[in-house]
Image (spheres, rainbow, N blue to C red):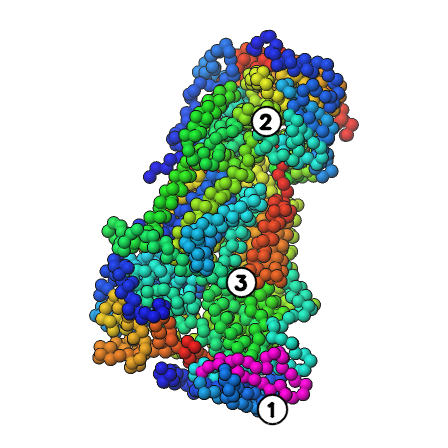
């Protein structure tokens, strides 16, 4: 559905990754985000313990890992929503540790939430408009003079409408965001983050619960964004999507980064298969395969039950 | 005195109709015709099949806001021991359909019957007593309760079985056993999903309604969920499953429904749907094939 | 109240000119008495005797033929307390109904919040219970009066009584409002001026959840006598005193008019002997049983009679002033109020006073609450303070009266 | 004017006046009784001089310790006690107060008091008796006890509130009136019907439970099913509070009244604390109820279900919990506990139509301080509130004791925004 | 029954001083709570410090009136910062209790004997409104239509009051239609989401708190000037409760709802009160009802009325039913 010729940015990204080691924490040629020794503990549990990680500018990087690996917590640390116990990280060379969340966003690093945060009693359109940065009308005094922000507002609205169209939310434009379905909220969450126009967008499971057909078209959009120079870091459990879109994959388990590399390599890494992918290998299973697997599992279970009995 | 509403909508009382604009369909460069109800839905199929159904819903109309229907005459039936999949675009009304079956959203017109008994608008907890289990899509755990207590709530009506079922659930999701004293509110997205699924498995329901049970789970666990669903079904439990992981869902289910705009767009066996080019284009996408 | 120099009579026209419309509404030949008394709020328990006092007076006046040949009209409203903030609305209603005189409010704070509105409209305000000294100097255009004496005299008498009983160390527990703190100051002045020592003065919040800390503070100071200055909360404070060991046997309790009730030993009274030997002061002559009985004909449920006589007197005085002025216009009433309360032939009810007036005589009304003499500021110029003592049955009996000038 | 007054007094005094010996005769004078520890002291010379120092007269105390010096007119006089004439072993309590400036008012005698004390025990100056440290610590101990006493009552009230809040999310401003209701029920059965207070309390708790039940059955439950928002319900509760409070005023009247039993019960001394026996029993009951309800909430099935309903009613229903049933149980228990709290409050205070309303702020403070929606938060928070109300009076004037407690509340909130026992929410 | 009096007093109440004061206070609450979701239960304190700031300046320290106004405003803003800096990070319900506590502290301090030389204890302060009435452009007389008229003093206070209300409403209208208002409403829904979009949530909350406080403080000035007196108990928690009631009666987050709500509230109070007292004096009620308890009956009915209004119109007069549907648990 997209142009067959490999787009320039993608090529650039792939080129950048080409010679790299497939080691956790490998340095990238042009990192936008550099993370060092970030640790977050909850009581006895070390949720995040990332030694070193770099995110290449202009690339689409996937962050995968089993449930509870610490991906969301890691996002929380980086974006200032939770304070890390130790460690430091720089974005565009700027130290961001201890910087409050809204400054992180203003610096150009925007995240979405896995458990969506729709602004219920605002309409979908208002949700979108809110994302835009540097709005004149958001200043108390200028807000009182509609003339000073009307033009900008119209531009913002136009941009929002385009995005809504893409995210299949145009029909919901004037409905309260609180009335959206689960999947629609995910879509709104992502669209709103894109309204910010960030340099680095961090998506936490953006497509979970989104219809596959729509996912596909949105992936095209994300690729386009990369063409426009945006860096994307996303968490996802849908391997089809990871394979389709990402230039580089970082794997987390039990708080630490255990592997890095291009998608294909990673997905055949036995450690990753073992910890994360399970029997779910590269290609989607055919029905027969599935049946087979099922029978295996069943037999196993039965034998277990017998053992117990 | 009229109040200028500060909100954007000029007429707050306007009742949006769900008939226009055209149905929500996937982006399609070929300009495929949107599915229209008249073209595909033929109630005779439903009526024929529903005859001997365990659970059936007929021409359901339901919604949240007065005057706006989300379900526009949805039909559904499940026979005993069947595994049904429901797919459809976001906002089609899949979750609403499950909630309506389960008595969480009031039925405005139409009927729901279980075992030939009318259960329209019965309260959820009485349905649980009749052996119906439900896993919601969102807000599906009790955040301030521990994992163990969450599961205990799942077995609320059969407290005696708690120990046994708890073992069973922990067998499937070993992560839960380790964390049994952790409050669900601090769990990761996937861990929550496990708790939600586990909670519904605490009783031994005869009908199980699952709303996107695999969302947010790692591929390994997704497999597990589908296998579990099928196994439970094999054990005689009737399962209705809403999934966005549509391909996987249709692979295992006996019959699939495609829901669009609150009404059935397609109903066929899972295998047929998965291979129907229209369905692929509009609802399944080609990504997984690539 | 009033300006220091100008007599009420001379300042009344000023009020008149500033509110001509209001004045045209009044002076219509019917004397309308409005009440602004507590039906709700924290002083609600003071309401019934006050309403009964006004009601009784009006009944007697009308039985005697009314004023200016017409029956006196009564309009009742609720003053609430300052936190409910409805007094002002009540005043609106009274003004709307052409009240010539407003009897009220009970609370000094409430009176202060409406005094401008009432006197600004050229209407006379007479409070039966305000004791705050604010009113003496308030710029009220000569329209504010009160029948309750300011706290000065009672404080002086109570302080003296405490010393006479040989208490060299005194603790004061006083309610935190104009009444409580004013009286407490006067008691303290009297005690310390006569050689005694106020070892602890605790001002308590009447809405406090409990009073144990307040009592503990008194206990720590170990006084020989405790002066209890307050209202209904005293019922909660006495058990606390008893609990912490400050029984009537150990320290002497002194009460004031706000709480000098007959607590009794019955179901909702105190155990026998709880107040044995305690003393108290109350302004005004003793309310005669006869008068109490009359009040009860108006309100059979009446238990306490605080400020009932003062309310009664305020109403009677108003009527007499109107008769004397041959007008029901507020400014005329205000001008005559001092006159009918001082110098002249004594009389003590409306009928006899009215007769004297129609006979062209100068009268001096002395009321149910004692000898009322308005001074130029509209305050009572002198008052009688009764001294009472409790027996083992927790009821009090009069032991003496003391009458004195308030000034000086 | 004096003439008139005398005439009036004579008229009015009637029989009373004749029977009781008049304490104030006509004419200005200074007088007093000299006593040392209750015993009259005689033979002490006291002299009076005018403001200008001119002697006016003097007197020597008689066997009964009395002395009197008439003065010519109202005004200021200097009254001096001749310390040399004091008997051996007796001295002025305040050395610097041998001479007093006394104002005599027109027409009245003025009592003057010279405080005496055994020699060696007197204070140097007339400053407020600086309390020695032992009585200070006694007071601190007493206040600590009172803090627990008050705190437990608040906690009981808070428990009822937090049960309902925790389960339905309703901020019930009418909760104070539930307390009043309980107290008034007990009053009715105790004072009007004449049952012993214990039985009256039991009945009142039962009725309180029934009241709670029917409030939910016929009111809040109906609103909930109609989908009223929590904010609307909060405001409705303000209306309900107003309504109930004035119903109480209507039937009960504005005055406070005690129960027939245990009123002004004499205190017993336990170490540094003096307390009435009823306090200990009440505190015991309160603590027991609080712990039992707290544990029930944590451990029993219904308790857990209540917390589940609090978290997510729809999901609770999906788990087979009868949400309305659970809420009704909670309302019943909440109403019963509120009633008990009301009875206890009435026992330690008085029954009045404002009693619940006046304590409501402290109840809210207790619930919040402990952490909203926690089983034992109400208990911990309320006791902290109670303790601070009482103990803060060591530093601040008692009129400001609530200020002390509220300041502490604010401070705690700053350092533990989720309350003492509360837990922070996870983001994302 | 004197229906004329009932009618006239009721109509006057709908535009009278109390309505003006409560409306201003409620507009402030509406900004804070209705739009920004801040459960500021200390609104009474904002009115209180403003009124006292002015009254004390003029009456205690004998400084000029306008300085008093400035000091009152400054005191409000300082209070907003004092309250806001530490508490705006709290969860909504915790914020409520902290602000209630703060308001009570303010009231108790005003009331205390300890500071009575400054604040005047429970009697409060008087004698500060002279300069205000000296500015009165109305010559002595009454102004109005027929019986619904006020004397020149009241007319002056009401004129100022309604002009201030108009300005405040205009301000709210402009602000809430603007992106600034959008941020505020978004904060009400979910702060974290707003933070993630790069807005300084704390700053906006503070702006809302200050703005709401300042609007409310105008009510405080008028209250003090209209009565020519301030008392601490005017600013008790009930005041704030009623302000909230008014906002919800009108419908939260609607520009005119506080004004209409305030009018309804006072109309209800006055109409019920006056009708009852007329009925009692006309002997129309059973003898159970007397002058002593009729005040209680009035508040009973008002409480009942408020309940019924909200039971049958839970979204308030101007509210949107759809928003309520989203709240339902
Ligand atoms: N506030 C908290 N208190 C205690 N444990 C926590 C808290 N927050 C997170 N955890 C734990 O930390 C671990 C990491 O959680 P996180 O949400 O980062 O996982 P994740 O990688 O995003 O998983 P998923 O793919 O399921 O979303 C989890 O085991 C979770 O239970
Ligand atoms: N609480 C609600 N109030 C009002 N409208 C709602 C509410 N919940 C859902 N809707 C509307 O109902 C429609 C169907 O929602 P539903 O949740 O059933 O969709 P769905 O098919 O489950 O979608 P998804 O795949 O995204 O979960 C949507 O258009 C949504 O906007
Ligand atoms: Mg996650
Ligand atoms: Mg759904």
Whether discs 1 and 3 lie on one chain: the answer is no
Residue, x 67% and y 79% (percent of image)? D121
* Labelled disc at residue E114: 3
> Horizontally, is D326 left or right of C153 in the view?
right
> Which residue is nearer to you in this view: C48 or E22?
E22
* Labelled disc at residue A108: 2
Q: Residues within 10 Å of mark 1 (few under 14, many from 20)?
A: some
Is residue A296 among what the camera can see?
no
Residue D223, image x and y in percent? 46, 43
Q: Secondary structure at mark 3?
A: loop
Residue pushed farthest top?
A: A5
Q: Which residues are magenta?
A: D74-103
Q: Secondary structure at mark 2?
A: loop
Screen quadrant of the N terminus of chain C: bottom left
Residue A92, image x and y in percent? 64, 25
Residue, x 46% and y 60% (percent of image)? E60
Q: Which residue is mark 1?
A: D43
Task: Tell me the subunit letter for badge 2.
Answer: A
Residue A95, image x and y in percent? 66, 31
Whether discs 1 and 2 lie on one chain: the answer is no
Task: Calculate the distance from the C-alpha at mark 1 to the C-alpha at mark 3.
Answer: 44 Å
Task: Calculate the distance from the C-alpha at mark 1 to the C-alpha at mark 2.
Answer: 97 Å
Residue, x 76% and y 24% (percent of image)? A303
């Amino acid at each position: 559905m997209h142009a067959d010729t490999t787009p320039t940015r993608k090529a650039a990204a792939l080129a950048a990754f080409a010679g790299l080691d497939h080691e956790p924490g490998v340095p990238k040629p042009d990192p936008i985000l550099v993370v060092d020794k970030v640790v977050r503990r909850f009581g006895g549990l070390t949720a995040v313990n990332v030694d070193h990680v770099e995110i290449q500018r202009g690339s689409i990087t996937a962050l995968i890992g089993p449930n509870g690996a610490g991906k969301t917590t890691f996002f929380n640390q980086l974006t200032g929503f939770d304070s890390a116990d130790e460690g430091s990280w720089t974005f565009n060379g700027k130290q961001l540790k201890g910087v409050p969340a809204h400054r992180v966003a203003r610096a150009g690093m925007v995240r979405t939430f896995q458990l969506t945060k729709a602004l219920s009693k605002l309409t979908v359109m208002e949700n979108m408009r809110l994302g835009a940065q540097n709005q004149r009308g958001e200043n108390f005094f200028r807000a009182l003079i509609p003339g000073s922000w009307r033009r900008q507002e119209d531009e913002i609205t136009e941009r929002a409408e385009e995005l809504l169209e893409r995210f299949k939310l145009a029909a919901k434009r004037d409905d309260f965001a609180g009335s959206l379905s689960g999947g629609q909220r995910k879509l709104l969450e992502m669209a709103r983050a894109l309204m910010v126009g960030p340099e680095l967008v961090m998506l936490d499971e953006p497509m979970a619960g989104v219809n596959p057909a729509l996912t596909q078209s949105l992936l095209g959009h994300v690729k386009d964004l990369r063409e426009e120079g945006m860096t994307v870091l996303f968490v996802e459990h849908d391997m089809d999507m990871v394979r389709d879109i990402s230039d580089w994959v970082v794997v987390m388990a039990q708080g630490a980064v255990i592997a890095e590399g291009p998608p294909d390599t990673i997905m055949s890494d036995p450690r990753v298969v073992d910890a994360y992918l399970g029997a779910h290998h590269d290609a989607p299973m055919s029905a027969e395969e599935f049946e087979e697997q099922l029978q295996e599992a069943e037999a196993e279970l039965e034998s277990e039950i017998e053992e117990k009995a | 005195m009229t109040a200028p509403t500060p909100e954007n909508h000029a007429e707050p009382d306007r009742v949006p109709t769900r008939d226009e604009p055209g149905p929500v369909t996937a982006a399609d460069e070929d300009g495929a015709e949107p599915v229209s109800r008249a073209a595909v839905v033929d109630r005779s199929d439903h009526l024929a099949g529903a005859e001997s159904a365990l659970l059936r819903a007929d021409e359901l109309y339901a919604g949240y806001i007065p005057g706006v229907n989300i379900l526009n005459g949805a039909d559904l039936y499940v026979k005993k021991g069947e595994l049904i999949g429901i797919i459809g675009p976001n906002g089609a009304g899949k979750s609403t359909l499950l909630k309506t079956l389960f008595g969480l959203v009031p039925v405005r017109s139409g009927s729901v019957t279980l075992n030939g008994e009318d259960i329209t608008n019965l309260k959820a907890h009485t349905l649980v007593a009749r052996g119906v289990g439900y896993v919601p899509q969102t807000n599906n755990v009790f955040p301030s309760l521990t994992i163990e207590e969450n599961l205990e709530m799942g077995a609320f009506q059969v407290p005696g079985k708690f120990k046994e079922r708890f073992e069973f659930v922990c067998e499937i999701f070993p992560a839960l056993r380790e964390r049994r004293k952790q409050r669900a509110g601090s769990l990761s997205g996937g861990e929550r999903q496990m708790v939600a699924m586990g909670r519904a498995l605490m009783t031994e329901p005869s009908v199980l309604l699952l709303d996107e049970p695999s969302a947010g789970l790692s591929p390994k666990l997704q497999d597990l969920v589908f296998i579990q669903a099928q196994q439970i079904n094999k054990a005689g439990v009737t399962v209705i499953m809403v999934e966005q992981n549509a391909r996987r869902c249709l692979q295992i289910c006996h019959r699939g429904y495609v829901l669009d705009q609150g009404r059935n767009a397609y109903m066929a066996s899972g295998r047929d749907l998965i291979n129907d080019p229209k369905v692929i284009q509009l609802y399944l996408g080609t990504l997984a094939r690539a | 109240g009033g300006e220091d120099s100008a007599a009420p009579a001379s300042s009344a026209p000023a009020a008149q000119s500033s509110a001509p419309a209001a004045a045209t509404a009044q002076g219509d030949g019917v004397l309308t008495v409005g009440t602004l008394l507590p039906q709700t709020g924290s002083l609600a328990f003071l309401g019934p005797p006050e309403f009964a006092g006004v009601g009784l007076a009006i009944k007697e006046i009308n039985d005697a033929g009314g004023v200016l040949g017409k029956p006196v009209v009564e309009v009742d409203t609720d003053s609430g307390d300052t936190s409910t903030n409805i007094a002002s609305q009540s005043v609106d209603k009274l003004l709307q109904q052409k009240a010539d005189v407003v009897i009220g409010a009970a609370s000094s704070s409430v009176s202060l919040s409406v005094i401008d509105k009432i006197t600004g409209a050229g209407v006379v305000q007479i409070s039966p219970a305000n004791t705050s000294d604010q009113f003496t100097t308030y710029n009220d255009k000569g329209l504010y009066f009160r029948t309750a004496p300011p706290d000065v005299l009672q404080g002086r008498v109570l302080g003296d009584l405490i010393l006479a009983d040989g208490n060299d160390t005194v603790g004061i527990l006083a309610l935190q409002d104009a009444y409580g703190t004013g009286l407490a100051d006067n008691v303290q002045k009297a005690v310390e001026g006569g050689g005694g020592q106020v070892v602890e003065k605790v001002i308590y919040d009447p809405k406090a959840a409990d009073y144990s800390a307040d009592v503990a503070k008194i206990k720590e100071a170990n006084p020989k006598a405790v002066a209890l200055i307050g209202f209904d909360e005293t019922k909660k404070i006495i058990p606390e005193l008893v609990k912490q060991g400050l029984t009537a046997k150990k320290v002497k309790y002194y009460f004031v008019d706000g709480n000098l009730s007959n607590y009794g030993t019955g179901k909702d009274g105190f155990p026998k002997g709880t107040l044995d030997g305690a003393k108290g002061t109350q302004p005004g002559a003793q309310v005669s049983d006869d008068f109490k009985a009359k009040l009860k004909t108006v309100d059979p449920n009446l238990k306490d009679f605080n400020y009932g006589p003062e309310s009664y007197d305020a109403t009677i005085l108003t009527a007499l002033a109107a008769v004397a002025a041959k007008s029901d216009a507020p400014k005329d009433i205000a001008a005559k109020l001092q006159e009918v309360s001082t110098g002249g032939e004594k009389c003590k009810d409306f009928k006899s006073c009215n007769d004297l007036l129609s006979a062209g005589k100068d009268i001096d009304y002395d009321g149910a609450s004692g000898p009322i003499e308005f001074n130029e500021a509209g305050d009572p110029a002198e008052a009688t303070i009764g001294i009472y003592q409790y027996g083992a049955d927790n009821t009090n009996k009069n032991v003496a009266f003391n009458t004195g000038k308030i000034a000086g | 004017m004096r003439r008139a007054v005398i005439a009036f007094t004579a008229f009015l005094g009637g029989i009373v006046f004749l029977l009781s010996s008049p304490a104030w005769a006509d004419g200005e004078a200074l007088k007093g009784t000299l006593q040392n520890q209750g015993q009259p002291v005689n033979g002490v010379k006291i002299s009076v001089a005018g403001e200008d120092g001119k002697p006016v007269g003097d007197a020597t105390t008689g066997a009964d310790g009395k002395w009197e010096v008439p003065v010519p007119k109202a005004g200021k006089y200097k009254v001096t006690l001749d310390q040399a004439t004091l008997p051996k072993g007796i001295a002025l309590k305040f050395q610097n107060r041998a001479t007093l400036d006394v104002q005599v008012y027109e027409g009245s005698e003025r009592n003057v008091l010279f405080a005496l004390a055994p020699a060696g025990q007197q204070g140097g100056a007339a400053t407020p008796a600086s309390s020695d440290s032992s009585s200070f610590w006694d007071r601190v101990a007493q206040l600590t006890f009172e803090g627990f006493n008050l705190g437990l009552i608040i906690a009981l009230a808070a428990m009822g509130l937090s049960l309902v809040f925790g389960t339905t999310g309703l901020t019930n401003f009418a909760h104070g009136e539930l307390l009043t209701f309980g107290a008034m029920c007990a009053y009715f059965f105790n004072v009007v019907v004449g049952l012993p207070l214990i039985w009256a309390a039991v009945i009142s708790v039962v009725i309180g439970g029934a009241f709670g039940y029917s409030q939910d059955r016929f009111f809040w439950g109906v609103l909930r099913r109609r989908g009223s928002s929590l904010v609307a319900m909060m405001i409705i509760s303000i209306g309900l509070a107003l309504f109930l409070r004035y119903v109480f005023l209507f039937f009960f009247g504005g005055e406070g009244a005690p129960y027939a039993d245990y009123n002004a019960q004499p205190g017993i001394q336990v170490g540094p604390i003096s307390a009435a026996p009823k306090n200990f029993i009440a505190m015991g009951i309160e603590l027991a109820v609080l712990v039992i309800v707290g544990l029930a909430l944590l451990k029993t099935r219904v308790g857990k279900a209540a917390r589940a309903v609090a978290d997510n009613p729809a999901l609770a229903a999906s788990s087979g919990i009868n949400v309305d049933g659970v809420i009704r149980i909670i309302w019943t228990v909440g109403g019963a506990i509120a009633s008990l709290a009301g009875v206890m409050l009435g026992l330690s205070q008085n029954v009045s139509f404002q009693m619940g309303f006046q304590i409501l702020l402290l109840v809210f403070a207790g619930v919040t301080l402990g952490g909203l929606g926690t089983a034992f938060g109400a208990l911990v928070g309320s006791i902290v509130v109670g303790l601070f109300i009482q103990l803060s009076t060591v530093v601040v004037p008692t009129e400001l004791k609530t200020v002390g407690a509220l300041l502490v509340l604010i401070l705690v909130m700053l350092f533990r925004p989720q309350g003492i026992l509360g837990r922070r929410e996870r983001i994302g | 029954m004197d229906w004329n009096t009932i009618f006239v007093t009721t109509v006057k109440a709908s535009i009278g001083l109390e309505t003006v004061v409560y409306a201003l206070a409620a507009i402030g609450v509406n900004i804070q709570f209705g739009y920004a979701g801040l459960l500021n239960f200390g609104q009474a304190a904002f009115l209180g410090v403003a009124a006292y700031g002015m009254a004390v300046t003029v009456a205690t320290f004998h400084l000029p009136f306008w300085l008093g106004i400035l000091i009152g405003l400054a005191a409000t803003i300082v209070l907003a910062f004092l309250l806001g800096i530490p508490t705006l990070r709290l969860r909504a319900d915790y914020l409520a209790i902290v602000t209630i506590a703060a308001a009570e502290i303010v009231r108790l301090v005003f009331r205390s004997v300890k500071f009575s030389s400054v604040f005047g204890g429970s009697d409060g302060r008087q004698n500060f409104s002279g300069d205000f009435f000296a500015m009165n452009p109305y010559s002595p007389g009454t102004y109005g239509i027929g019986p619904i008229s006020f004397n020149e003093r009241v007319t002056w206070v009401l004129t100022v009051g309604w002009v201030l209300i108009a300005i405040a409403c205009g301000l709210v209208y402009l602000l809430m239609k603007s992106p600034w208002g959008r941020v505020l409403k978004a904060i009400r829904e979910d702060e974290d989401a707003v933070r993630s979009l790069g807005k300084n949530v704390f700053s906006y909350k503070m702006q809302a708190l200050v703005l709401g406080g300042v609007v409310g403080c105008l009510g405080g000035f008028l209250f003090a000037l209209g009565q020519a007196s301030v008392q601490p108990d005017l600013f008790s928690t009930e005041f704030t409760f009623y302000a909230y009631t008014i906002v919800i009666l009108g419908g939260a987050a609607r520009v005119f709802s506080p004004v209409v709500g305030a009018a309804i509230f006072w109309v209800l109070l006055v109409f019920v009160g006056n009708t009852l007292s007329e009925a009692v004096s006309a002997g129309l009620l059973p003898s159970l009802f007397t002058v002593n308890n009729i005040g209680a009956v009035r508040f009973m009915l008002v409480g009942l009325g408020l309940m019924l209004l909200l039971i049958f119109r839970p979204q308030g007069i101007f509210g949107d039913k759809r928003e309520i549907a989203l709240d339902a648990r």
